[in-house]
Amino acid sequence: MDHDQDDGHGGQGERHGDEQPARPGRVHFRRSARNPNGSTAPLRADVLAVLGVLKVVTYKQLHALIANDEYRDHQRTEHVAEAVRDLIKHKLVEERGRTSTIGALQPGTRPQPTTRSALGARSSGPGEKIFGLTPAGLLAAAEALGDDREMGGHARGAGETGAPHAMLVNEIIISAVTGTTTHGAPPRTDERQAPPRRALPEGPLPGGLDAWATEVAHPIVGKQAVIPDAVVRLPELGHPVLFVEVDRGTMTDINKVATKLDNYHRWFSKLVKEGHHERPLFEITYGSLTTPGYGYHHTDVVRPPVLFVFDRGLKGGRPRFTEKGLYARIDAFGAATHHHWQGRHHEEEGVEYQTFKGKIPVLATTTDRLLEHGFLGPDTWWRYSLGSWTDLAHALDPQPDHDLIRKRRKAREAQERADAQAATKAEQDALDAEQRAKLLAARAHNDALHPCHTCHGPLGGAHDSSHELDENTHPDRLECPSCELGRRAAMGRPLILELPTTRALRRAEKNGPPDDDPWWRVRLLHAKRWPKQARGDRKIPHSMTQIPRGRSMPEKH
């Protein structure tokens, strides 16, 4: 009867007759014939899960992702090594060689611990062991991950030449998952100890290791397929999926690197029939940013982002590119792929922005930036078409500054209202000035005539009163507008001056108009129009009773 059952502590159950004592410091776990290295089932499942994502790893990379066993010394990698050795015995994991090194050991020298840099460089000495999954291990890893994801291949050839590319991709994923990195940390003197990890300023990406996948093929046509270096799902940042590509400079012709984006474009353009409509395959596979609604068309959908990480690489033990040359390579890549990412420019309230219907959001960074500041660092990413380094959230969704646009719109509308009010006021002021000038000219003319016969005030009306005339009145007028209105209100007849006496006529003929009678000329006119006989009959023309408001009486002929 087989008693190789996990006990309550996650270790192996006791086997009667071949029980072995626990190692010093490991009192809770016992070795068995099935698992002679004494690893626990949960730990082996964690190792399989990590391998299911990364495909090939070293002990230290496993330790970075599985440092959660309360019974272990987290400074050493022995516990993950024991799990790996037990999985090798089960034929789920196999050794794939060693990581590449710089230079070679001289005879008689002692091996030094290897250290990982941002460029993938390693110090002289033997590399670290690389482990990968067998085909059976890939199935076991899928069960350990516990979801229906596409597992991808098991990277059969990786490790034969040191796997520098895979090791760099692993370090990038580890930094994203854990929020830590060995970049810039001093090496330990004990090669059995895990290297120290420096906490990144902004911490890890959401989603953890389960959000990542590698070696996943996306078929285009026939045997052609896009196989990203890594795929990460980030619904927390509003994107169902992101694709990550790492460039170590092994392709010197940047146009060949640009063809990767051509292949992405071909896969993003694949359509799937869904009812009476067609939808992009990537939406069916990973989900869409928004639920397709009325008026939906696949050509208007923004494609998933593709993130390119540019590394200085190594050639003959030296970096392929200087720092300046690396950034020139980033610029050259953008120029070669502009037709994929170039958006449509807009301007609103002085704020310029772009829209990207049917385009691929392409982001770039360097390994130095990424491993120094992390995925969420403030200046980690260069979004082609933005023209500045920014954080991941803004790079993925470069929305215009709506608050600034609203603020400027309100300021503009307020200024327009103020300008309109100022223009109206200026127009009114000009009209008032024109009317005032007309009034003053009329006032000067009317004041020069005889005064009102009734109130003895100005003939044009009291100055600045509501009834003052704004035009020249007729010289024959006798009353100001206020007195005329009062007479009309009292139903009185128009004013007709008394006939001059014979004596007064003679005096005027001899000496001129009398000084004490300013209305003499009008009196003579009235005497001519209405002689004594007409006045006796009280025959007054009808037009004399119709005096327009604010207007002078018409001249009678």
Image (cartoon, grey):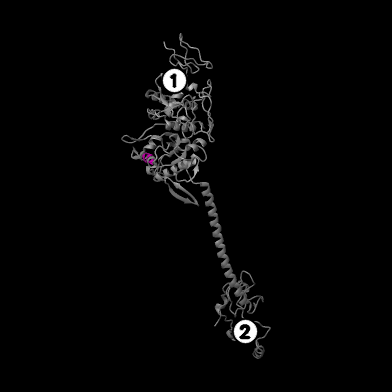
Amino acid at dot 1: Arg
The span picked out in magenta is 258-263
| Amino acid identity at mark 2 | Arg
Residue 85 tag number: 1
At x 53% / y 54%, what residue is drawn? 412
Q: Is residue 355 visible?
A: yes
User: Is residue 262 a member of the stretch shown in magenta?
Assistant: yes
| Depicted 224 relative to depicted 479: above or below | above
Neighbour class for label 2 at 10 Å: few (<14), some, many (≥20)? some
Q: Please state which of residues 228 and 305 is positioned toward the viewer in this rendering.
A: 228
Where's residue 322, x and y in %?
47, 40
Q: Nearer the viewer, mark 2 or mark 1?
A: 1
- On residue 521, the disc is 2
Instruction: Name the secondary structure under disc 1.
Output: helix
The majority secondary structure of the magenta stretch comes to: helix
Circle 2 — which element? helix
Q: Say which label, 2 or 1, has the lower sequence index.
A: 1
Q: Where residue 217 sits in the image (x, y, percent)?
A: 37, 33
Q: How many marks?
A: 2
